[in-house]
């Protein structure tokens, strides 16, 4: 009779794992393992060999799924080589997603008859006689996969026990078949269902439609809705297309610092980063009198972590310029922060910025790059996010696909700030904010220009008054304006702003003095003009505004996963 052990795979794996940790000598392993087996042997017919090469996780998962003990016989010639193989990390394999199953022109018909596994969350379930219909979504696409389960399928007791509720996570194995319904071409005939995670009946996102305002209070769960799942996928596609555009055009991606001592915009709306507030206590129990002060009563910044005041960055541009003057064309893509006490639908305290910088370039080059970039990323989502864009076109903003298509097809309009003021002054409508030369254009002015005056074409306004623009922008020959530009688009207004940077040292130093900015804080920025200065330009694009523009979402707080606004830092 051949010896066979009746052990669960998990038990056998634990034994092997323990041996492998202690020694890799074959003789030692064989003796120790044989001693273990002598206490647990039964006599039966030989069964399938026990595979030492199976990973511990795989064996335990197999045991968990089947809940059955498997008889396996021990090979006679196992040793260090087999043990070493058992330690190896398994090969990573891309998982099959619903988007792949239902994607393509035939919507899954080419996969009929395939046995497959899907993992996802229950959107809805309904029981009709002995058949249960479960709509499952894994986040890879807008569409759910309808799973049809009969009472003889393994795991049907989960349905009978009322466990398959909206929000529950499932592992389902089945065969793809032609759907009997009209809403989809294929469905999954369930062979086995495993409940991975139960969902409490109090799950707040049900089939009925919820407002975006309510969903902001459930930001940890709102990605499971159609709207916010679609926003997340389009946001991802825009980010990918951003890197793709710049990489294809020879730009180098640079990581700009989040903590800085400079104020790029000069507006002073920055979040302070400090360790002067005692951190050994609870934040709510930090006495003000424990903050170190100078003899004059001011905050003693020399005792702070950085030895001077430090802030969260409002822009990576100044740092980006240092690399542009070495690598020629670069871009940054990262988080920025502004402590602007604004509760409008256009502002966030934390947002992401895309900021390219081009060396040996002027304002014309800057406008050309901005135009090409916007057309590229818009074209990318129209071609690669069709299902989500159709959803936005139906439920969020009717006509959004045409609006975006116009961006890729129409020529952008260019006019000076002075001409824009003349145009607004002649408009046959009353604006909330009066228009005069030298004023900063408001959203209502920007949208009128792009939506009404130019019939939905994107518009670039250039040559703004220097008194309303940042210190680093190049002064034009007239002494009154700077080589700056803003790109305006329908529905949003200003989408991006840029300029040719002031490359002349004496002009930049004078500008800092005029604006009462501390030259010492910008010593390194001035050095760029001392050592091989070149004409250079760039622009900044608030990524969330781009997402808002591309999805039609009314509020910018719905264009970012976890919005940070005055009085709100949840999640």
Image (spheres, rainbow, N blue to C red):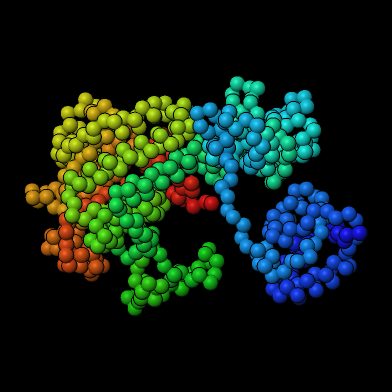
Give the image location of residue 154, x and y in percent: 77, 38
Horizontally, residue 433 falls left or right of residue 393, namely left
The image quadrant that residue 442 belongs to is: top left
Residue 440 appears in the picture as rendered = no
Question: As rendered, which of 345 and 113 lies closer to the eye?
Answer: 113
Question: As rendered, which of 383 and 211 lies closer to the eye?
Answer: 383
At horizontal 73% and vertical 39% (from top left) the residue drawn is 192
At horizontal 23% and vertical 64% (from top left) the residue drawn is 525
At horizontal 8% and vertical 48% (from top left) the residue drawn is 478
Horizontally, residue 510 falls left or right of residue 380, namely left
How many numbered circles does the render carry?
0
Question: As rendered, which of 281 and 455 lies closer to the eye?
Answer: 455
Compared with 516, 446 (above or below) is above
At horizontal 16% and vertical 62% (from top left) the residue drawn is 533
Compared with 231, 58 (above or below) is below
The image quadrant that residue 101 belongs to is: top right
Horizontally, residue 376 falls left or right of residue 143, namely left
Residue 277 appears in the picture as rendered = yes
Q: Which residue sits furthest left?
A: 478
Horizontally, residue 538 falls left or right of residue 247, namely left
Compared with 95, 388 (above or below) is above
Q: Quadrant of the N terminus?
A: bottom right
Give the image location of residue 115, x and y in percent: 67, 37
Compared with 88, 101 (above or below) is above
Give the image location of residue 311, x and y in percent: 36, 63
């Amino acid at each position: 009779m051949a010896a066979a052990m009746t052990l669960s795979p998990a038990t056998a794996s634990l034994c092997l794992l323990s041996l492998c940790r202690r020694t890799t000598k074959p003789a030692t392993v064989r003796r120790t393992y044989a001693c273990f087996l002598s206490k647990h042997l039964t006599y039966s017919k030989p069964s399938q060999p026990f595979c030492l090469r199976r990973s511990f996780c795989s064996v335990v998962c197999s045991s968990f799924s089947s809940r059955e003990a498997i008889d396996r016989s021990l090979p006679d010639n196992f040793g260090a080589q087999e043990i070493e193989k058992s330690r190896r990390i398994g090969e990573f394999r891309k998982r099959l997603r619903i988007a792949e199953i239902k994607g393509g022109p035939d919507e899954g018909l080419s996969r009929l008859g395939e046995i497959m596994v899907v993992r996802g969350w229950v959107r809805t379930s309904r029981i009709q006689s002995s058949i249960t219909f479960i709509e499952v979504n894994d986040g890879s696409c807008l569409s759910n996969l309808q799973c049809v389960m009969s009472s003889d399928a393994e795991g049907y007791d989960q349905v009978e026990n009322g466990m398959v509720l909206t929000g529950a996570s499932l592992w389902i194995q089945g065969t793809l078949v032609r759907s009997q319904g009209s809403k989809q071409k294929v469905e999954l005939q369930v062979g086995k269902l495993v409940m991975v995670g139960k969902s409490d009946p109090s799950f707040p996102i049900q089939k009925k439609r919820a407002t975006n305002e309510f969903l902001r209070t459930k930001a940890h769960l709102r990605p499971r809705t159609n709207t916010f799942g679609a926003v997340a996928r389009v946001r991802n596609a825009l980010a990918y297309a951003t890197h793709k555009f710049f990489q294809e055009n020879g730009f180098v991606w640079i990581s700009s610092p989040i903590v800085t001592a400079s104020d790029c915009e000069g507006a002073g709306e920055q979040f302070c980063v400090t360790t002067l507030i005692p951190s050994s206590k609870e934040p709510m129990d930090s006495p003000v009198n424990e903050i170190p002060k100078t003899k004059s009563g001011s905050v003693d910044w020399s005792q702070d972590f950085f030895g001077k005041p430090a802030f969260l960055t409002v822009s990576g541009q100044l740092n980006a310029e240092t690399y542009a003057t070495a690598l020629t064309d670069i871009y940054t893509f990262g988080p920025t922060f502004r402590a602007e006490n604004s509760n409008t639908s256009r502002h966030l305290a934390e947002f992401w910025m895309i900021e390219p910088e081009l060396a040996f370039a002027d304002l014309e080059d800057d406008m050309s790059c901005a135009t090409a970039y916007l057309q590229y990323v818009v074209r990318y989502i129209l071609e690669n996010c069709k299902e989500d864009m159709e959803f936005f076109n139906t439920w969020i903003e009717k006509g959004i696909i045409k609006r975006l298509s116009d961006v890729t097809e129409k020529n952008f309009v260019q006019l000076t700030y002075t001409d824009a003021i003349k145009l607004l002054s002649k408009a046959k409508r009353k604006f909330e904010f009066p228009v005069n030369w030298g004023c900063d254009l408001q959203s209502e002015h920007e949208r009128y220009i792009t939506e009404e005056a130019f019939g939905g074409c994107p518009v670039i306004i250039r040559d703004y008054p220097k008194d309303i623009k940042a210190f680093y922008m190049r002064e034009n020959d007239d002494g009154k304006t700077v080589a700056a530009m803003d790109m305006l688009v329908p529905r949003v207004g200003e989408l991006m702003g840029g300029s040719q940077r002031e490359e002349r040292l004496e002009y930049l130093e004078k500008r800092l003095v005029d604006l009462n900015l501390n030259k010492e804080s910008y010593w390194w920025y001035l050095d760029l003009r001392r050592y091989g200065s070149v004409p250079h330009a760039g622009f900044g694009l608030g990524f969330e505004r781009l997402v808002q523009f591309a999805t039609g979402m009314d509020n910018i707080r719905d264009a970012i996963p976890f919005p940070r606004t005055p009085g709100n830092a949840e999640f």
